[in-house]
Amino acid sequence: MNDQRDNPVLAVNGASKSFGAVRALNGLSFALAAGECVGLVGHNGAGKSTLVGIMNGGTRPDSGTIHLGGNDETGRYSVAVARKYGLRCVFQELSLCPNLTVTENARIAHASISGFGWRRRAERVVRSKLDEIFPGHGIDCDQAVGTLSIAQRQMVEIAMAFSESDGPARIVILDEPTSSLDANIARQMLDHIRKFVGGGGSVVLISHILSEILTTTDRIVVMKDGGLVAEGPSSRFTMETLVGAMGSVVRARDAAAPPRDRTGTTPALTRRGTDGAPEFRAYAGEIVGLAGLGGHGQTETLVELYRGFGGDWLAPADVKAAFVAGDRHVDGNLPMWSILRNISITLLTDLTRAGIVRDGDERAVAQSWRERIGIRTDSLDNPILSLSGGNQQKVLFSRALATRAPVVLMDDPMRGVDIGTKQEVYAMLRAEADRGRTFVWYSTEIDEICQCDRVYVFREGRIVVELTGADIREDRVLAASFSTEAA
Amino acid sequence: MSVVRALYAKPWIWSFVAAIGVWLVTIAFTGGSSAGGLAQAALTFAAFSIIVGIGQMFVITLGPGNVDLSIPATMTLAGTVALKIMDTNDSLILVGILVALAIGLAIGVINYGLIKLLRIPPIIATLSSSFIIQSAAISYNRGIRIKPPAALAEFTTATTLGIPNLAYFALLVSAVAWVALEKGIYGRWVSAVGQNMRAARMAGVPVDGVRAGTYLVCAVLASLAGLLLSCFSGGAALNMGAEYLLTSIAVVVIGGTAVAGGFANIPGIWGASLFLFLVVSMLNTYGASAGIRLLLTGVIIIAVIIAASRSPRA
C-alpha cells in the first residue's frame, strides 16, 4: 500500500479556495493511488464539492499544486486535461440531455466516437457497460433520456463514466451516485467499484449512506470547514467514530432552554409525515429548524408550506406567512427595483388604500427597517443590485419581518452573510419569536440549527428524526443526516 | 440643463422626438397649410393605437413570452356584434357598449384559461384563440356592413375645442392606467411578476390573479377600441383589426417599455402612436409608393428603437 501512496495517480497539495469571504478549502492535501477507493465524507460546507471541482478541473484553486499521473499539471489543469487522462465524474445533478436518446448522450460524452456508424458504436459502448454493471437493467438505448426514471438515468450516467472510448477510465469520482438507486442496484454499482479498483482503477466515493462508505472504500477522508479532520483505512472506522469525526467537540447548547410542554396547544403549522415519517409541527413562538444535508427536500418542504397558505389568485387581507429566500437571484430579488420597493413588496397590501400605495408610509417602514437591520446604503432609492450579497439578504429579511405574518419561512437565508450580521439577525429572530411569531428555518449550518427549539432532520426528501430541547446536538443531527443503517 | 438631462433620461422621450420630427418634416413639405389638420388626424388615429397599446403594454410587462395576439380578432368581434345588436338604434347604445365589454371579458377569461389550465405559452394561446374569435365574427357577420347608431358615429368623429373626442377618451384611459401603474398596487405587482415570477410569488404577489387580470384588461380595452373604430369608420369590417396586431406591439416597444418585462411606461405609448401615424402620412404626402412606404416605416421603427435603447434608463 505504501509504495502506491508515494506514487499517487492524482494528488492535490495545499489547495485553498475562497468564494468571496467564504473560505471553502483551507490548504487541503489529498492523494489518490491506483487501485484505491477513497470515501470522502463531511457535512454541508465541509468543502467536498469544492475539492471535487478542483480534481475534475472545473474549479481553479487559489493556491496549491495538482499532479495527475505523476506529472505536475498546476496552472494548466482543466476539465479537458483531466478527461484526456481518463478522469470521469458522476454528479448528483444529472448531466444528461433529456431530449436525446441514451446512445446520443453517449456520443456527446465520448467525442472520439465520430464519423459513419457512430450510432452503432456509441450504443455498443454504453450498452456493454450497462450490461456489465447492472445486469438485467432493462434500459432501451434508443429511448430518450427524459422518458427514463431517475434511477435509470443515474444508471446510464454511471455506466457512461466507467465506459471506454478514446481511453479507459482511470479515475472515477462519484458524488452521491446511489441517492436515487434502490438497495439492489446500489449493491451492483458498489460491486462494480470493487471490480474496477481491483483492475487498477481509482475511485473517489461521496455518499451520505455511511454503510456504503465503510464497506466499499479502502480509505476514508473526513472533511470539515475546508480542511481534513480525520483520515485512515476504512477498517479503522465505525459508524460512531465516523459521525464523531465529522462533528466538532460536542457542545452543550448555548441556551439550553428545556423543551416547553406543548400538550393541549394547537400547532401553528402541521404537515403529516408520509410512510411513517414523523409529523411536522411548529408552535407559535418557536424557531423550528430543518436540518440535514443540502438538497434533501428541505427547500421543497418550505415552498409547499408557503403555498399551502394560498394567495395565488387573491392577496389575503392578513398575510399569513412570509418567505425569506436563500437563493436570492432565483427566489428573492426583484432586480430592476430599488431597495425601497424590494423591502415593501410583501407588506404592500397593508400600505395600500383603495388600490393606491401610500408612498409616505412605505418609505417610513423601509427607513425604520434600514436602521433596525443596518442596510448599508446612502439611499433606499438605489437599485437592490448595488448592495453587497449580505446586504441584499438583509433586504429580504426586512421584507418578511416587516409584515404582520405570524409564520416566517426561511430557506437557508444566511448564505454569504458575514458573521456580525448573522449575530444581529439571530438576536432579532429570537426577539420576534418571543413575541409569538413562528419561524421555520432551513439551515445548512449546525450552529444555526442548534439555536432552534425543535429540529427536523431530513434525508432523501423526508423527515427522519425530530429533536427537541437538549437532544438538539451536532452529533444527533449528523447521525440522522447520514444513513447509518446497514445496507 | 438639468431639465434637458432629466428629459433625456426618460425612456419615452425618443418616441416624442421622432413624432414631432416627422410632423415638422411633413408640414414643411405642404408649406404649413395642413399643420392643424394633420395634428387632428394624428390624434384621432393614434387614439385607437393608444387604447390597444396600453392593454398590450401591461401584458408585455408580465415578462418574457407574454403577448396578446388576439387583439385584432377581439376588436373585430366586439365591433361586429355590438353594431349588429344596436342596429343603428340610438336607444340601444348602452346595451351595445355592455355587450362589447362582455365580449372582452369573455375573451380575457378564455385567453388566460388556455394559458393556465392547458399550460400553453401565451403567444400560442392568444394566437389560436384569435382564430376562433375571428371565425365567430365571420359567421356572425356574413359580410354585411352594419352602420353604427348615429349618436355614436357623431361622437367618434367630432371634435371638442378643436381636439378629437377620441383623443379625450384615450387620455382618460391613459390617466387611469397611469395611476394604476405608477401609484397603484396593481402596477407594482405587474412589474414584480415581470421581473421574476417565482420571486414575486414567494414575496406574496398573487401571481395568477395579476396575470389573469392583465389579460382581461387587455381584451376589454381591445373590444372597446374595436367598438369605437367600427363607429368611427362607419361600420364594422372583418379585417378592421388587422393592422393593430403589429401596431399594438410596436407602440409598446417604441414607447420605451421593456420588451423583456418588468418595466412599463405610458407617455411613450402616446409618442409612439402619434409617430407611427405621422410616418405613414409623411410618406403619403411625399407620394411614396406602398412598397417604399412599408420599407421606410420598418427602417424608421428600427432607428427609433436603437436610439431609445441607447439612452440611459432612469
Image (cartoon, rainbow, N blue to C red):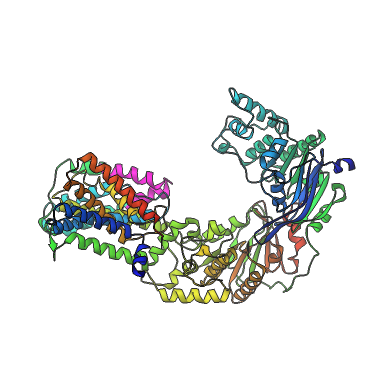
Q: Is residue A263 left or right of residue B101?
A: right
Residue A137, position as x, y percentages in the image: 67, 33
**In this view of the protein, can residue A273 be seen by the observer?**
yes
In magenta segment, residue A37:
no
The residue at 58%/29% (across/down) is A142
Residue A322, position as x, y percentages in the image: 53, 66
Q: Read off the magenta span.
A: B108-134
Furthest residue in direction right, as rendered: A2
Q: Main secondary structure of the magenta part?
A: helix
The residue at 67%/37% (across/down) is A155
Q: Decide which of A162, A213 is in the foreground and name it.
A: A162
The residue at 85%/51% (across/down) is A237
The residue at 30%/61% (across/down) is B267
Residue B134, position as x, y percentages in the image: 26, 43
Q: Decide which of B310, B154 is in the foreground and name it.
A: B310
Q: Is residue A453 left or right of residue B213?
A: right
Q: Quadrant of the N terminus of chain A?
A: top right
